[in-house]
Image (tube, helix red, strand yellow):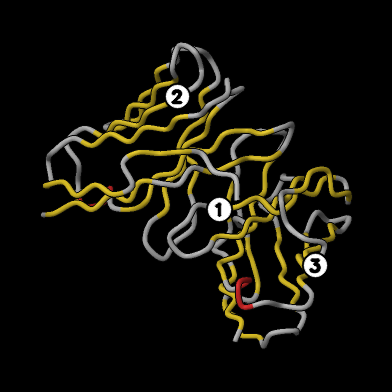
Amino acid sequence: DAGVTQSPTHLIKTRGQQVTLRCSPKSGHDTVSWYQQALGQGPQFIFQYYEEEERQRGNFPDRFSGHQFPNYSSELNVNALLLGDSALYLCASSRTRNEQYFGPGTRLTVT
Amino acid sequence: GQQVMQIPQYQHVQEGEDFTTYCNSSTTLSNIQWYKQRPGGHPVFLIQLVKSGEVKKQKRLTFQFGEAKKNSSLHITATQTTDVGTYFCAERSGTYKYIFGTGTRLKVLA
């Protein structure tokens, strides 16, 4: 049973560019949440997707958007990248409001 | 960003010593979750507490939820080098959003 997978593992982008990160949830999970984790800090909630709809959002600008597909996989898109967007981006899947299973993350570096 | 306070921020212990981290909120919590993140890794779910005064044990780990549901603690008995990592609490805000604590980074000296 595969756990949560994310791609790519690492990414380097330039300021102003756009990036798409991908996540496949754990088998049987229908809910995907995205988090941003800056170095030395706790994960910050970006948003959560369920039934292909964004159902709650954290304090992130509209440059951050997402999508969930019918197979429950999800994408996180970030436009107009800033240096401050450099972080580890974590995807977490769950069923209902139980424990979240995190993927290995995508390390994004913006130069 | 919005975060839950955890203390201490760092803790260095000798192997075999006990360790405790505390999570405090200004509001009454519906539930609280605990996660462990190894260096270079991702958060791994440990436990969820829901009831006032609840105490749960996992081998050497003891988790407690305060009577007023405003604080929680994680206690590790006789730490081992495998306990190294950052421990986060996470509280639910609204229906689906989880706010993670600032984390306690544990270093175990052999």
**Residue at mark 2:** B71
Q: Residue visible at 37% across and 62% down? A: B39
Left or right for A15, reference A90 = right
Image location (x, y in percent) of residue B45: 50, 42
**Residue at mark 1:** A43
- Between A72 and B9, the residue placed more toward the observer is B9
Q: Earlier in the sequence, mark 1 or mark 3?
A: 1
Secondary-structure class at tag 1: loop
Image location (x, y in percent) of residue A54: 84, 49
Q: Quadrant of residue B91?
A: top right
Q: Are marks 1 and 2 on the same chain?
A: no
Secondary-structure class at tag 2: strand
Q: Residue visible at 80% across and 67% down? A: A63
Q: Please, what is the three-letter code of the amino acid marked with disc 3?
A: Arg
Q: Residue visible at 77% across and 80% down? A: A18
Q: Residues within 10 Å of mark 1 (few under 14, many from 20)?
A: many
Judging from the image, mark 3 belongs to the subunit labelled A
Q: Residues within 10 Å of mark 2 (few under 14, many from 20)?
A: many
**Residue at mark 3:** A63
Secondary-structure class at tag 3: loop
Judging from the image, mark 2 belongs to the subunit labelled B
Image location (x, y in percent) of residue B72: 42, 26
Q: Are marks 1 and 3 on the same chain?
A: yes
Q: Tell me the CA gap for discs 1 and 2.
A: 19 Å
Left or right for A23, reference B19 = right
Asked if A11 appears above or below B84 in the picture, the reply is below
